[in-house]
Every structure is written in C-alpha cells, then in structure tokens.
C-alpha cells in the first residue's frame, strides 16, 4: 500500500510543469533578443545620419552644378541660369529656383548704334480698327448722359472678342464723356512718333526726372506727363514749371473733365489707351507716375521689342500667376469692395477662365502693369481697347483683367512677359505724396451700398458690376486659392 501511495505522488509530481525550466527559457529568449534591438536601433540612427549627410552632399553637388552650368557653353545647361529660358521658368514654377528681386538687364551697349526697324510689324488678324464715338444710352436705361466708356451692352462686349479683319469697338473717348485735351496739346502730340508716357491724377505724385537718357533718345522721344487739373495745380505749387507746361524733360498734357469719380480709374485712361491719346505714335513706353525711369528708352525698345521681334511687352507679377490669387490679395489689401471683386471674378469664372497652370501658353495670367512697352499695331490697339473696356465695366484693378482678355482672344494676342527682376531694375520707386483711400475699398457686403450709403456706387464706372448679367451667377463657385507668398 505504501508503494501505491508513493507511486501516485511520484506520478502527480511528474505531471506538474517545470516552472524553473520555463522561466529560464523566457529569460534566455529575452537575453538573445536584446542585442538585436540594440543593433536595429543603432542601425536606424546610423541610417538617418548617413541619409542626412548624403542629402547635404546632394544639395552641395546641385549648387556646384548650377554654378558650373552658368558658365557652360552648352545651350541646355546654360539655360538653367538664363532667367528668360523655359528651363528656368519650369524650375521656378516647381519652387526649385527663386529669382532675385533685381537683376541686370541685357541691354545693348550703345543707344547710338541701335538700329530702328524701317518697317512696321505685319498686322495679323486685324487690318482695320475703328471706334464708337457716339454713346448709345438706349443699351442701358439706367443712364441717360454720355459716358466716357460708353454704354456697352453684354452682346457688344462678347462680340468684341471675336477677331475679324475689320472691327469697330468701344474704346473710351465718347463725345462729351470727358478727358478732353486742349487744341494746343493735340497739336503738340501730333509730332510724337516715339513716346514715353506717364500720368498723375488727384495730386498723388510729382514728376520724377528720367536718368541715363541718351542724347539720341532725347531727340527721338516725346516725354508726356498726363495730368488732371487738380494735379496740375499741385505740381505748380510744389515743383518748378516752365512756361506752364514743362517740368524738366516732361511735357505736361492736361486732361480736363475727368471721366470717372475714382482717381484710380482716371489713371487707366492714359495708361491703357495711350494709342488713342497719341494716335500718331508708333511706339510707346508707359511708366507709372510714382516711378523714376533709369534706363534709356531706346535701349528698352531694343531689348523688349525689336531683339525678340515682339510688339507688346509687360513684366511678370512678382508673387501671383493666377488671377484668382490676385483677386484674393486685392480683397485682403482693401484695393476695392470685396463683394464687387467676387462678382467680377464670378463673371470670369462663368465665361471659362481657368486658374493659371504651367500647361498654359503664357508665363503668367497676372502682369506688373506699371510698365508697358508696345508697338501700336492694330491688334495691340484692339487688345488695349478690350483691356480698357474690362476696367471700365468692372473693377479698376487692371491686373485682374489682363489675363482674361488674353484668354478670350484664344492665343491670337502674342506678348513678351519679361522677368520681374528686370522690371525692378528699370526704375526707382518713390512714395506717393499721400496715401490713396476710397470708401468703396472698405466695403465688405453689398448691404453697405443700400440706403444712405448708396452714394458709394460709382456713377460713371464699374457699371457692369450693377447691370443684370445675362446668366445665373449664384451657382458659380470660385476656385480655391492657396496663399503662396507673404503678399497673398
């Protein structure tokens, strides 16, 4: 019996798990895994360090390659450093290259040696261009008196974008619409074939004398400063005026009876409609009144027009390529009433204007409009008229409508958009004598135009913002805007 008890105890003991053995196996497994974890951790840290070093070496190699390519004789490689090249523009669009604020302009060395073309550029698409001069108020019953820009109907606007050999369009200067020149000034500008034009309205600036102008350019160009009567009085009280019409090299051209309530809109008349103010001019260079020109104008024509066989040149905007981005920036900087800018953009969106992308044929949809260089061909004159009509109908911010007119002409209008860094090297910027401010720029809602504030509406410009548009814009959604720069 004792043997049976002993046998049963030994059997129970044999069936129990050997816990000491299991614990030893677990500890042995943990001790074998620990070195592997240490190895993996150290390996990952080394991998990060090696990757960082390789990345820094890659950046250094790219920089050295970029410097070498600038001196390379190979066209493709040197194009990486050429700010005019497609390669540079692609890298800029991708954010891999940042152009400088200012850069040297590849000007010809001597204005005396510049060869002026003997023949005008051939006229494409449009051979003959004429203008409406009598305002037809029957197209819009809300106004009965003549308007400078005319009562252009939506149908007339749409038809003006359809190119034909012979065209008649609205282009400002309606009879009794304002902006009249004196007979003496009209007679003077008849002799002007080459024009440098500028403008000052509402006394916001004083004339700045151009520098580095060659003797040849002084004889060749008329330097014409367009002013209103308020600015003329301001200039006479602050600057020495010779014979009531000369300030240094500038010949003052007075426009009586400003056509608009808004000074910014009045300034667009000589800026965009230069060919109408000075109809005998073959070439013109526009520069805003707050700028001092520091480049010889003949060298500018050679650089921006004749060398590349262009007829219209304007600078690329520094920050924006997309019109909708520029509109967003205008709203935040209070450049005009926010709801009216939105309405303006909804019309453009409804009419098919897509946000700018690198796939478009132009470098940008947004220019720096302070400098415009052009030959007065029929097509360029038509473009200027259509551009002005948009400024007349909608907001006075001309940068919002430039790209739209280019879009509506469906690639027929060719122009040279030169780098912004060259644009900043053409002038010295001077501050306005005072800050411009208009109550309409602070409007945030259409309700603010009602009741006692109805006087905020412009009575002679921007009427397309208040005229019933021949389509439902309520369902139009503006494209989202990515603010890619400090300026918006």
Image (cartoon, rainbow, N blue to C red):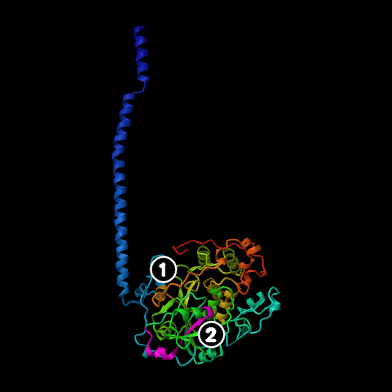
Q: Position of residue 457 (x, y in %)?
A: 62, 68
Give the magenta part as a residue range: 212-230
SS of the residue under disc 2? helix
Residue extending farthest to the top is 1
Relative to 271, is 292 on the left or the right? left
- Out of 131 and 262, give the one closest to the viewer: 262
Neighbour class for label 1 at 10 Å: few (<14), some, many (≥20)? some
Q: Position of residue 355 (x, y in %)?
A: 53, 67
Q: What is the quadrant of residue 475 in the picture?
A: bottom right
In the picture, the disc for residue 106 is none
Q: Can residue 368 be seen at all in this image of the molecule?
A: yes
SS of the residue under disc 1? helix
Q: What is the quadrant of residue 157 in the picture?
A: bottom right
Q: Position of residue 391 (x, y in %)?
A: 57, 74
Neighbour class for label 2 at 10 Å: few (<14), some, many (≥20)? many
- According to the image, label 2 marks what residue? 275
Instruction: Report if residue 315 lies within the magenta region.
Output: no
- According to the image, label 1 marks what residue? 92
Q: Can residue 228 be seen at all in this image of the molecule?
A: no
Q: Earlier in the sequence, mark 1 or mark 2?
A: 1
Q: Position of residue 198 (x, y in %)?
A: 48, 81
Mark 1 or 2: the one toward you = 2
């Amino acid at each position: 019996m004792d043997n049976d008890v002993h046998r049963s105890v030994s059997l129970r003991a044999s069936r129990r798990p050997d816990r000491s053995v299991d614990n030893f196996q677990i500890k042995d497994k943990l001790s074998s895994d620990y070195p592997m974890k240490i190895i993996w951790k150290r390996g990952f840290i080394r991998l990060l360090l090696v990757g960082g070093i390789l990345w820094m070496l890659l950046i250094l190699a790219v920089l050295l390659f970029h410097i070498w390519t600038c001196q390379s004789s190979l066209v493709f490689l040197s194009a990486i450093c050429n700010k005019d090249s497609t390669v540079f523009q692609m890298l800029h669009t991708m954010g891999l290259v940042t152009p400088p604020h200012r850069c040297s302009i590849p000007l010809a060395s001597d204005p005396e040696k510049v060869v002026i073309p003997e023949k005008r550029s051939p006229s494409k698409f449009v051979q003959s261009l004429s203008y409406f001069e009598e305002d037809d108020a029957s197209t819009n019953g809300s106004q009965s008196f003549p308007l400078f820009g005319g009562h252009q109907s939506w149908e007339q606007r749409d038809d003006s974008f359809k190119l034909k050999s012979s065209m008649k369009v609205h282009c400002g200067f309606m009879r009794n619409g304002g902006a009249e020149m004196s007979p003496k000034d009209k007679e003077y500008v008849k002799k002007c074939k080459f024009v440098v034009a500028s403008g000052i309205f509402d006394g916001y600036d004083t004339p700045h004398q151009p520098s580095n102008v060659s003797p040849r350019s002084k004889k060749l160009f008329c330097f014409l400063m367009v002013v209103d009567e308020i600015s003329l009085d301001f200039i006479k009280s602050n600057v020495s005026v010779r014979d009531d019409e000369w300030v240094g090299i500038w010949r003052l051209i007075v426009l009586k009876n400003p056509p608009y309530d808004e000074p910014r809109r009045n300034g667009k008349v000589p800026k965009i409609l230069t060919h109408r103010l000075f109809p005998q001019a073959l070439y013109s260079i526009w520069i805003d009144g707050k700028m001092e020109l520091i480049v010889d104008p003949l060298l500018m024509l050679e650089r921006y027009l004749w060398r590349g066989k262009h007829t219209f040149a304007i600078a690329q905007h520094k920050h924006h390529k997309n019109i909708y981005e520029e509109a967003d920036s205008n709203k935040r900087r209070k450049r005009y009433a926010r709801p009216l800018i939105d309405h303006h953009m909804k019309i453009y969106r409804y009419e098919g204007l897509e946000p700018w992308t690198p796939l478009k044929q132009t470098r940008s949809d947004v220019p720096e409009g302070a400098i415009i260089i052009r030959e007065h061909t029929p097509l360029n004159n038509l473009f200027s008229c259509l551009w002005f009509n948009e400024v007349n109908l909608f907001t006075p911010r001309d940068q919002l409508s430039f790209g739209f007119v280019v879009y509506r002409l469906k690639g027929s209008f060719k122009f040279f958009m030169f780098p912004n860094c060259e644009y900043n090297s053409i002038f010295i910027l001077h501050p306005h004598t005072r800050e411009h401010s208009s109550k309409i720029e602070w409007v945030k809602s259409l309700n603010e135009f009602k009741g006692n504030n109805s006087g905020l509406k412009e009575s002679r410009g921007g009427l397309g913002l208040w005229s019933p548009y021949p389509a439902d814009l309520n369902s139009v959604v503006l494209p989202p805007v990515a603010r890619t720069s400090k300026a918006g």
